[in-house]
């Protein structure tokens, strides 16, 4: 059997194709059953996220090519379209890929933490569906073990690598706790939506979204229990904000120096942290001259992000070494299991030959045949039976002048003469 990892991801396929072959949670059980029936996979896991769909399976060598066809047929896409945008890893490379994915080393955002939970869920779904056996149980134990080590022993996820996340992390450095901070977000685009989610994860209780269009602001605010404002209402409420993060498409500044100065005066000069993620700027540069205003621009944050990304790259190199070590451990375990199976098969075969000949000998004795003759015949037949395969292997190695194989056989059969 061969371990395979087959799929597509954000690096190999456009979003249109990724959408087509994504699996909904409700479809996983049916898909796993179909995969086993159509391809003969003895074990399998299906991982499906917004950035990747991958099939991990144990397959007969002759059935490896069926995975691509099965996935294309299951989702009704052209097999060639899938083949042109996919990748296939086998055995050691497959194990290495699976572990790198779980560690966030193959993610769009290097080191992103969500993928480990998604891999764990995919494994749990497969286990509950009855398609997990010994090899995959051990493979994913190794996978989760190395992912945990990477998280705890490296800085792969310690530093912000998006301006949205960096702005929230910077706020945490200025305010000891964000839970009690009052936050005003200006704009309702993708960046502000991401900032809002990061703030919500930090348990911010007071969150307000201001936008030119209230409906769009409401769409971001509702899931996060936030309030909404129009841009025209900002001057009345700016004094209440400890943190202001802005990202709009406005061609003119939203917050001027005078407006912020007035707000600080009403706050009795309690500090205000402002982040301007917009280009052109939403906040006048002169705001940074005010004593109690801490203003950061997208360029300031980009420098932080680039430095942190470099740190993550260094951590990723260490993580890759950890993965390589874990893969080797799994491969050694798997090889030991193969050895056990071979030894068991050899022992079973030998015992079967013995039992057959013993049964025949007992029947001869029962028929009155002389005991000595029966024993000699039994010994000869048993010897011939047991040495047949090794003799054939020795002859083949010698005739083919395969000295390496011949040496292995001589060593295995303990045929080397003693010096004494």
Image (tube, helix red, strand yellow):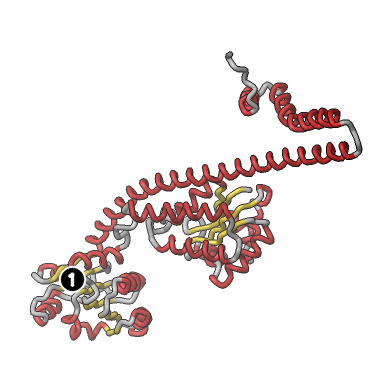
* Residue 145, image x, y percentages: 43, 54
Residue drawn at x 56%, y 60% is: 45
Q: Quadrant of the C terminus?
A: top right
* Residue 221, image x, y percentages: 34, 81
Picture quadrant of residue 244: bottom left
Describe residue 366's horizontal placement relative to residue 312 as left or right. right
Query: Helix or strand or loop: what does disc 1 sit on?
Result: strand
* Residue 82, image x, y percentages: 59, 58
Residue drawn at x 8%, y 79% is: 268
Residue 85 seen anywhere in this rendered image of the structure: no
Residue topped by disc 1: 273
Picture quadrant of residue 156: bottom left
- Dot 1 surroundings within 10 Å: few (below 14), some, or many (20 or more)? some
Residue 378 seen anywhere in this rendered image of the structure: yes
Residue drawn at x 48%, y 44% is: 329
Q: Nearer the viewer, residue 2 or 344?
A: 344
Q: Nearer the viewer, residue 76 or 370?
A: 370
Q: Nearer the viewer, residue 178 or 147?
A: 147
* Residue 127, image x, y percentages: 56, 63
Q: Is residue 134 above or below residue 340?
A: below
């Amino acid at each position: 059997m061969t371990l395979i990892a087959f799929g597509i991801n954000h690096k190999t396929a456009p979003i249109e194709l990724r959408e087509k072959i994504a699996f909904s949670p409700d479809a996983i059980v049916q898909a796993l059953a179909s995969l086993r029936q159509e391809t003969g996979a003895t074990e399998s896991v299906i991982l499906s996220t917004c950035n990747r769909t991958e099939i991990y399976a144990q397959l007969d060598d002759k059935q490896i090519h069926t995975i691509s066809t099965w996935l294309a047929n299951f989702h009704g896409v052209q097999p060639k379209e899938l083949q042109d945008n996919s990748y296939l890893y086998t055995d050691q490379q497959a194990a290495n890929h699976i572990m790198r994915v779980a560690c966030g080393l193959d993610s769009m955002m290097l080191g992103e933490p969500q993928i480990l939970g998604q891999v764990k869920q995919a494994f749990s779904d497969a286990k509950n569906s009855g398609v997990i056996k010994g090899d995959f149980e051990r493979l994913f134990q190794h996978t989760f073990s190395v992912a945990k080590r990477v998280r705890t022993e490296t800085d792969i996820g310690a530093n912000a690598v998006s301006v949205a996340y960096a702005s929230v992390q910077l706020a945490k450095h200025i305010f000891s706790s964000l839970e009690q901070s009052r936050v005003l977000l200006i704009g309702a685009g993708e960046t502000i939506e991401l900032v809002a989610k990061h703030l919500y994860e930090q348990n911010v209780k007071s969150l307000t979204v201001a936008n030119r269009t209230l409906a769009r602001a409401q769409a971001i605010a509702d899931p996060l229990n936030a309030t909404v404002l129009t841009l025209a209402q900002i001057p009345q409420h700016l004094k209440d904000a400890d943190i202001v993060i802005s990202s709009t498409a406005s061609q003119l500044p939203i917050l001027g120096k005078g407006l912020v100065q007035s707000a600080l005066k009403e706050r009795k000069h309690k500090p205000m942290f402002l982040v301007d993620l917009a280009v052109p700027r939403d906040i006048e540069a002169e705001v940074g001259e005010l004593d109690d205003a801490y203003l950061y621009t997208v360029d300031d944050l980009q420098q932080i992000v680039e430095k942190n990304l470099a740190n993550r790259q260094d951590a990723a190199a260490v993580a890759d070494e950890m993965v390589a070590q874990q893969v080797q451990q799994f491969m050694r375990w798997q090889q030991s299991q193969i050895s056990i199976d071979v030894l068991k098969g050899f022992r079973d075969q030998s015992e079967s030959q013995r039992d057959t000949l013993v049964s025949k000998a007992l029947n001869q004795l029962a028929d009155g045949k002389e005991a000595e003759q029966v024993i000699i015949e039994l010994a000869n037949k048993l010897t011939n039976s047991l040495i047949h395969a090794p003799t054939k292997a020795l002859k083949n190695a010698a005739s083919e002048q395969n000295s390496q194989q011949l040496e292995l056989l001589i060593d295995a059969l303990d045929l080397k003469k003693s010096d004494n």
